[in-house]
Each structure stands twice: as structure tokens, then as C-alpha cells.
Amino acid sequence: MINIFAHATAVLPDRVIEDALVAAEDGVITEVTAARPGAVPAEAVDLRGALLLPGLVDTHSDGLEKELNPRPNAEFDVDFAVASFEGRVRAAGVTTIYHGIGYQTAPRKGRDLDRAVAITEAVARRAGGDPMVDHRFLFRLDARDPAALAALGPRLAALDLDVPPLVSYEDHTPGQGQYRDPVYYRKWLEGSQGISAEQAQTKMDALVADRDTRAWHRPVALDWLSEQARTGRARVLAHDPVTAEEVALAHERGVRVAEFPTTVEAARAARELGLDIVAGAPNVLRGGSHSGNVAARELIAAGLADALSSDYLPSAMLAAAMRLAADGLVPLHRAVALVTSGPARVAGLTDRGALVPGARADLVAVAVAGGWPTVRLSHCAADRIPEARPLELSW
């Protein structure tokens, strides 16, 4: 099947083409050029006034958790949640999504191992059907939880994917990583649970004491992850690194991505060692971290970020890219690369993320009004009308 898109402003890896023509056949881009007068086929989709970008690649999305349980005690069927969230993601211009699946026990975030397994299976079912986006896995492993590793191991071994899944190793103990300053965790407890500072401190101390009893498992998990990286079973991410020493240790163990570095020191060390660096798109829009860590804009301005992920808000990716360009922090093509080719490289996906011949034909047309972008068209390489078959209802 041939698709032709004409008259948009196309954002290429190194430049912008005004009044462009992009053609695709059977899900692959075949031509990217200026639209010549009289040479645009009548059947072309007219995208006059829009920007045409590659489909966005999101390497870290926790949004499915919220779709599954949007309010306390209001949990939905997991297959419904995946299908529902898929529509939300595509409307945000995301055509490849890595669902963050927490192999960890975190009641305050609704995470437990049974739920992690159920989400893993539901995402696999959706990916194997007629999905509207390319569903992939980001397994978020609690480095201090032996049960989490025992649950993840067989699921990872059973996967047969074209590209290895992402696995991030995480330690959310107050005083570590994102909450290296435990005051932010205590304040979060006060605000989210409506308790006093003294009560929050007591809860936090109990959590730290409990997690310290399992600190012995952290090197065990890192050794296992190092083996997965070495054998090509997974692409491993260091989550929330704080110091250059942490980054160097991760690099020695086969880690090639620093996800959400919390300091300039960690990001600079990652750059020096050749690691890709992922920052959060919501951080860009908010102007800083919600937990007092380094601002994504500061990293981008210093050339210390290669990709942005949605973290918890799919619509933030496109908005962050447009805002960065509008504010003059980076040129438009570099801002777009942060949500397309950059995250594709982070994930090891070499077939997408750029408007170039031979690339996967994931395309997004965007209109910008009032300073904010709106997706007007989203085209995925795998788009097709499912084969006609009798409607089957089973209630």
C-alpha cells in the first residue's frame, strides 16, 4: 500500500523542509523531498500548515498503571486498560511505547508482583493482535527485592522479541536515587497521606529499616542484570544515578543508558563514558524536578541529554519538544530528535525515529496553536484494516 503526505513542514534529522512530500510503501518511507509544483498526486494527504514528524518513541511510560487504576479502589480489567491507554498514547503522537512494569512491591503506587505479571501478559497479548502502536517492555526491577527478581527472571527468559526489552534497576529507598535528600520523600508522605511531619518521619524510618534488611540483594540483582546485558537478553538502564562513581560502576556492568540522572555530575560522567542519557519530558514542562533533582532543561542546554521520555504523562513528550524549540534552547530538528531518533537509539531500535528513506513509516502531523501542539494525524507503519471475520462476542 502506498501513502503520500504532502505540503507539510517536514522535520528531518538535520534540517527542516518547507512544503515537503513524504511517500511510504508497505510501511516503509520511500521518499522525502520538496513537493514540486504539479508533481503531487491527487490522492496525497494534504497537510498544509502542519509539521510532519517521525512517530514519537517513548522509552519509559508509567501511564498504564493509572489507566488500570485511575482512582483508589477503582481498578479496571487489565486488557481493557491496555487497549484504552493505547488510544491515549496514539493521540499524543507516540507510535512506539515502552510500558514501565514495576517488578517491585510499592503499595503507595499500586505495584505488586502479581500485578506486574498480569500487565506483562496483557501487553504481550495486545502486541500480538492488531495494535495501533508498537507495544514494548520496560521492566522496572527493585534491586533490593529477591521476590521481584524471581518473578522477572522467567518472564524475561520466555520473551522472543526482535529487539531485547529494557530493564532498569531501581532503588527507591529514601536517601537513594530520586530521594537522595529524604526530606522530599517525607514531604511527599505528608502531602499524599495528610499526616504530620513527625508521623511521616516515623513511616519513612520504618521503610528505610525494612529495606536495609534486603540491601544484601542489590549486588545480586546487579550481577544478574550484568549477565542479561552481556548475553543480549536485555538492554539495562541505570535509574536515577546520583554520582559519577555510580555511573562508572553501572558502565562496568554493561549498562549503556543513564535514565533520569539526578545530578549534573552523574549526567556528565555518563556522557564521558558514552552512555545515552534519558531525561523526563514533564520535567521540561514544569521547569524542574518534582523531587528537587537537576532540571532537564539544564541537562539539555549542556548537551547532556539524548532522549526525553513521558515518565507518567504521554502528552508531555511532544509538548516538551515544541517548547524547547520555541524557547530557543535547541533548534527544532534537535528538539524533535529528543523524542524520536534519540529514544529509538536508547532502545536499540534502528528502523525508526527519522524521516529518511528506508525508515519505518511512523508519522505524526502536528498543528501548533497558542504555543501548544495538537496531533492532527498519526500514521503507524503497521496500520491496516484487520482481516474481515465474524464478530465474536463472549460476555
Image: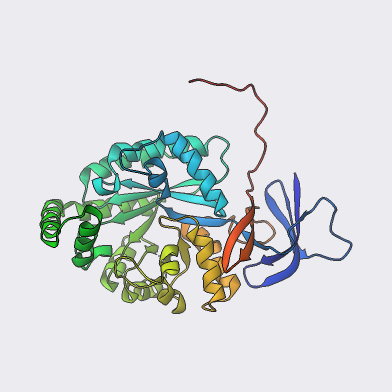
Identify which residue is drawn at 87% across, 65% down: 37
The answer to which of 143 and 311 lies nearer the viewer is: 311
**Residue 106 visible in the current orientation:** no
Give percent across and percent down for residue 331: 58, 76
Q: How many marks?
A: 0
> Which image quadrant for residue 11?
bottom right
Q: How is the image coloured?
A: rainbow
The answer to which of 383 and 342 lies nearer the viewer is: 383
Give percent across and percent down for residue 71: 35, 43
Quadrant into which the N terminus falls? top right
The answer to which of 89 and 11 lies nearer the viewer is: 89
Give percent across and percent down for residue 307: 47, 65
* Above/below status of 173 relative to 153: below
* Above/below status of 185 relative to 137: below
Q: Left or right: where does residue 6 sit relative to residue 194?
A: right
Q: Left or right: where does residue 330 sit relative to residue 200?
A: right
* Above/below status of 123 relative to 186: above
The answer to which of 232 and 31 lies nearer the viewer is: 31
**Residue 368 visible in the current orientation:** yes
Q: Left or right: where does residue 330 sit relative to residue 284?
A: right
Identify which residue is drawn at 33% across, 60% down: 239
Give percent across and percent down for residue 146: 21, 45
* Above/below status of 46 relative to 26: below
> Which image quadrant for residue 350?
bottom right
Q: Left or right: where does residue 112 sit relative to residue 300?
A: left
Identify which residue is drawn at 75% across, 50% down: 3
